[in-house]
Image (spheres, rainbow, N blue to C red):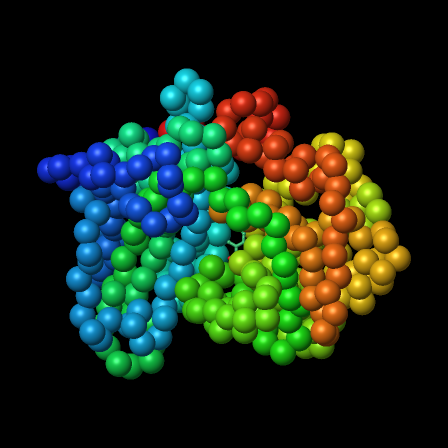
Amino acid sequence: MDTTTLKVLVERAEKSKIGQVDFNNLSFGNVFTDHMLVCDYRNGVWETPKVMPYQPISLEPSAKIFHYGQSIFEGMKAYKDADGATWLFRPLENQKRLNISAHRMAIPELPEEYFMEGLKALLRTDEQWIPTSEGSSLYIRPFMLASGTGFHASPANEFKFIIACAPSGSYFSGKVKVLIEEKYSRSANGGVGYAKAGGNYAGQFYPTQLANEKGYQQVIWTDDNNHEYIEEAGAMNIFIRINDTLITGPTSDRILDGITRKSILEIAKDEGIPVEVRKITVSEVVEASKNGTLKEMFGAGTAAVVSPISSFGYRDADYDLPELENSYASRLKKRITDIQYNKAEDKFGWRYKV
Ligand SMILES: *Cc1c(COP(=O)(O)O)cnc(C)c1O
């Protein structure tokens, strides 16, 4: 077996920008670290990955990313524990999913070693950028784009894999009001909804703007066929609690296989919470709200971990969720973040030391 690890080149920034950053007032994803990782795909191979100063990238106007949106991304975080050690949470799941997205978008897959060694080299270079205050972390954005040129509507032959990072404060925006969407769809059977393809998110912006104008912060996506089933909450997976049972929809072409989602499912089972993975109808949720058995709704994703929903709008009526003490949302969020920040035992083996 070949045990040599991949070499990653490192070109350090001459001067750090870190002194200009107020680490006590970090928002989400608006300031970027000193470095980025760049790896080019040319002539059928991924070249040597390189950590270099964070800077604009140069692309030709005919690069296919601009015309055909051939691009994908991932979202993950690095955490500092009380002893200053750096941890990732299930990073190989992101690496695998990046390649699932790549495959669907006709982008060449990136070998695991390039992803993991590139990521670790970048995190070691920008280590002081990982915030230490409660609930903050370094948000990591790996992405791939078609840098190859041509107006012909076909896959590019050159790509870039880049990782950029943003120190971020705790992502707490309060409880959200959501609108169950019955006209627009996020994804369809046979489509690209299960991939983290750039265009999926652009397609959500307009329906979300319409919902914002009506006073809702997010859209609850339903199936594209009859808008009968609840599928996702904005760019998060959705969980519903009816009585004491926690329910989420099954992953499919239309529902993204979230790492937070699957971690919550495992933790909930471990907590002895009854869990169901099955289709959720809009009508059962409305009915459960009317008869008082609907206890909680929340989104789940890397950025916010868990995002509780205060009320949902459906066909001109609003339905409020109750205020609960010791909600599943807060219990599950605490369990998962305690693992992420190395504050609790990691019985599932999810933590990864950098
Ligand atoms: C990324 C994403 C999620 C959440 O995935 P995590 O791995 O938990 O961050 C859920 N839904 C959509 C549409 C997403 O893009």
The answer to which quarter of the image holds residue 324 is top right
Which residue is drawn at the image coordinates 40% and 56% (left, top)? 73
Where residue 342 sits: x, y (%)? Answer: 51, 24
Q: Quadrant of the N terminus?
A: top left
The answer to whether residue 91 is visible is no
Q: Residue at x 51, y 70 (%)?
A: 209
Q: Residue furthest top?
A: 83
- The residue that appears at 36% across and 55% down in the rendered structure is 143
Point out residue 30 in the picture as x, y percentages from the top left corner: 34, 50
Left or right, residue 349 beside residue 316: left
Residue at image location 28% in from the left, 61% down from the top? 159
Residue with the most extreme left position: 14
Residue most extreme to the bottom:
152
Q: How many marks?
A: 0
Residue situated in front as seen by the camera: 83 or 63: 83
Left or right: 328, with 2 as reference point: right
Q: Residue 146: x, y in percent?
A: 30, 65
306 in relation to 205, above or below: above
Q: Residue 210: x percent and y percent?
A: 54, 73
Position of 10 with respect to 90 (left or right) is: left
> Is there any visible trace of residue 316 in the rendered image?
yes
Image quarter hosting the C terminus: top left
Q: Nearer the viewer, residue 185 or 207?
A: 207
Q: Nearer the viewer, residue 141 or 240?
A: 240
Vertical side of 174 occupied by 135: above or below: above
* As drawn, 128 above or below 243: above
Left or right of 233? Residue 123 is: left
